Amino acid sequence: TALAMQFVERGTKAAKAGISTVDEAVIAGIRVWEAYGKKGYDVTRIYDLMFHAVDEGIILFKDLATNVGRVADSFSNAGIPLEELTAEIAIMSRHVTAPQVFTALENSLRSFLKPGKQAKDLAAELGISWSIATLRSNGLAGAIGELFEATKKQLGPAATSNQIMDKTMEN
C-alpha cells in the first residue's frame, strides 16, 4: 500500500542518516504512527519530529527507534502532542542516557496518571494540582516547572536547585 511505502521510504532515509537499520527505523515510525496517526500526524511529520529529537538532543536514531515505542501510546493517550514528547526526549538526552530518558518519561507520566499519596500530599502542601488535567493543560515541562517554582517559593528565594530537588524527591 501507499502508506507502507511511505514507511519504507522514510525509514530507509532515517536509517542512512541516523545510523540504524531500516527495520528499526520503519518499526519506530509505525509505532509512533499507531499512537499519533489518529491525531492527524502523517508519516513525514512523524519522522521529521523524530529527526528533530536526534538533531537537538544527544541521542542516536537507533536509540530513539528502540525506545520510543515505550512511551508513544501513553503520551498520545494522555493528550501530549508529539512535538512536546520529542522535545522532551531531545532535552533530557542532553543530560542522561537514552534508556534513562524513556524510563524517566514513563515514570513522570505514571505520576500524573496515578499519583500516589505522597505526590498528592506534596502537591496539596505546595498548593498545586498534580493530575492528568494539569499535564494536559501545562504540558510536561510546564507541570514540572510549576512544581519546581512552588517548591522554590516554599523554601525561599535563596533555595538552591539541589535543595528543591531534595524536597520534591523526599515525597
Image (cartoon, rainbow, N blue to C red):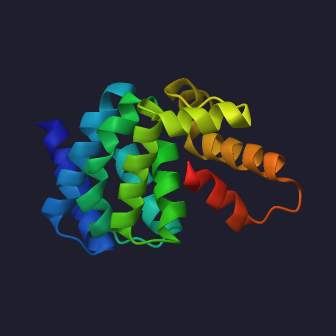
Question: Residue 157's spot in the image, x, y percent?
Answer: 89, 56
| Relative side of 82 to 156, left or right | left
At 36% from the left edge and 57% from the top edge, which residue is drawn?
102
- The vertical placement of 98 against 105, above or below, is below
- The part of the image, by quadrant, that contains residue 75 is top left
Q: 24 or 66, which is in the foreground?
A: 66
At 50% from the left edge and 28% from the top edge, which residue is drawn?
132
- The part of the image, by quadrant, that contains residue 150 is top right
Question: Residue 124's spot in the image, x, y percent?
Answer: 66, 30
User: Is residue 90 among what the camera can see?
Assistant: yes
Question: Residue 59's spot in the image, x, y percent?
Answer: 40, 70
Give the mark count: 0
Q: 142 or 60, which is in the foreground?
A: 142
- The vertical placement of 94 against 146, above or below, is below
At 30% from the left edge and 37% from the top edge, which residue is drawn?
73
At 55% from the left edge and 24% from the top edge, which residue is drawn?
133
**Quarter the N terminus occupies:** top left
User: Is residue 9 among what the camera can see?
Assistant: no
